[in-house]
Image (cartoon, rainbow, N blue to C red):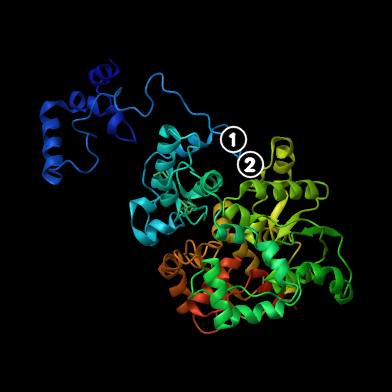
Amino acid sequence: EIATLVKKYHGSLSGEHGDGRLRGEFIKQMVGDKNYELLRQIKYTWDPENIFNPNKIVDTPSMNSMLRYEPGQQVPEIKTIFHFPQQTMLQHAEQCNGSGDCRKTQLSGGTMCPSYMATRDEKDTTRARANILREFLTHSHKENRFDHKEIYEVLDLCLACKGCKSECPSNVDMAKLKMEFLQHYYDANGVPLRANMIGNYSKLSALAAIAPNVYNAMINNSFTGGMIRKFAGFAAKRSLPGLHSITLRKWFDEKWPAEKQGATGNKKVYLFCDEFTNYNDTTIGIKAVKLLHRLGYDVQMVEHPESARAYMSKGLLRKAREYAEDNVRIFSSVINENVPLLGVEPSAILSFRDEYPDLVREHLRTSAKSLAKHVYLIDEFLASEADKGHITAAQFTSDKQHIKLHGHCQQKALSSALHSKKMLSLPLNYSVEVIPSGCCGMAGSFGYEKEHYDLSMQIGEMVLFPAVRNAATGTIIAAPGTSCRHQVKDGTGVKALHPVEILYNSLV
Ligand code: SF4
Ligand code: SF4
């Protein structure tokens, strides 16, 4: 009846979004028999086999047929570890509206979806992943609806870059869905050795850090290094991250009090001693402490557990939740709007804002949400302090320097690489160019894994590696992410620096 009225008053039944399946049955009435026949002729001239989007626009069934939900259909109740605010996990997967924006190429810019950009296979889109989850979570006859190899295969190449969380028009958060899926899949099929090893990255690093030189010699020796890679299921061509001679925590507790020079500022900040900076990128952590101190901040560090990023990335969510809850408890007592928590590794510090509020149990959710408001990537903090006039160009060199910056995926999805750009632009004559790269392809452990190595390098080759190779002599490559720096080194041989190192080195 509405269609008849619309026709009578010369209106249009559809607006920005077309007719498709929903209003397709009324098109004939709207455009008339003659025009409708022309539409059919166009469709079947170009698509005689009716392959592309069949039964949309022409020959569309009635709007109350072929529905996702039939009357009386039971909606399964699926218990999840993550909290999905105001919806269920299934409803989150159902948010995918099929628009196909996740089928971008690297020429379109943005991050979503790196695996599709590389393979150009529909199976590797965010859409395919959302669809397969929806299908099995709705129709599986198993008690554990996640226990299907097919889901595992379609989700396998998701790098958990979070590109979709910000770029998909429906904000499908596939990284979160994948983490949740993996935990339930492992519940039915056991946790693979490699996932366990990667999840326990901190514990293994702590063990190796007892004798860092021995560990470094072992990973750099072709025989022992090869054995480690083989045992761990890592690619033979991938270099392994080395350990620093001292952990950041040990340096901070034992060396920093003696090394500290000059007065300590009044503004207190806490530094999150994440597991990657603590064991591998200690120099960056040290420079972060020294830079903050020189800029007039009172840097504090407390005892706290790891960020649990490695557990999360492998879907070991119950384990990750223990650490998330401890971190929320510990930092809630010292962090507030005047005392921020800062971190140098985006994947670790951004867990406080992204995953923790939905990962901790209900009794800690309010604390986790309040805490999240005062947690910053150091780049964000320094950029905002510069905006307030608390840090000025006079504190840095006036030498000329060009920098090419690759932002971290999670930083781009949850914050912005522009904070790093602003921070790096503090010295008067520093020019910063943001590389229009998406994901670097490493994505935590993804690029180490032997079956993912080639795809990882292919993703790196799309934009990032050529941009690094083509940089003019003397250009500094900046990358806040530890994985990104590792990937740049393996892909181009160039050592990228954390923005904190660059800014520290430019202090006068
Ligand atoms: S995942 Fe997002 S971008 Fe991809 S088809 Fe679905 S709604 Fe569109
Ligand atoms: S998290 Fe990244 S890789 Fe995974 S579906 Fe989203 S955009 Fe693609």
- Residue at figure coordinates x 55%, y 82% from the top left: 222
Residue 503 rendering spot, x and y as whole percentages: 68, 72
Q: Is residue 63 left or right of residue 501?
A: left
Above or below 476: residue 299: above
Secondary structure of the residue carrying tag 1 is loop
- Residue at figure coordinates x 80%, y 50% from the top left: 338
Above or below 157: residue 460: below
Q: Which residue is mark 2?
A: 358
Above or below 454: residue 334: above
Q: Earlier in the sequence, mark 2 or mark 1?
A: 1
Q: Which residue is mark 1?
A: 85
Find the distance from the CA under tag 2 to the CA under tag 1: 8 Å
Q: Which mark is residue 197?
A: none
Residue 11 rendering spot, x and y as whole percentages: 27, 24
Q: Are marks 2 and 1 in contact (CB under 8 Å)?
A: yes
Q: Nearer the viewer, residue 212 or 70?
A: 212
Find the residue positioned furthest to the top. 1
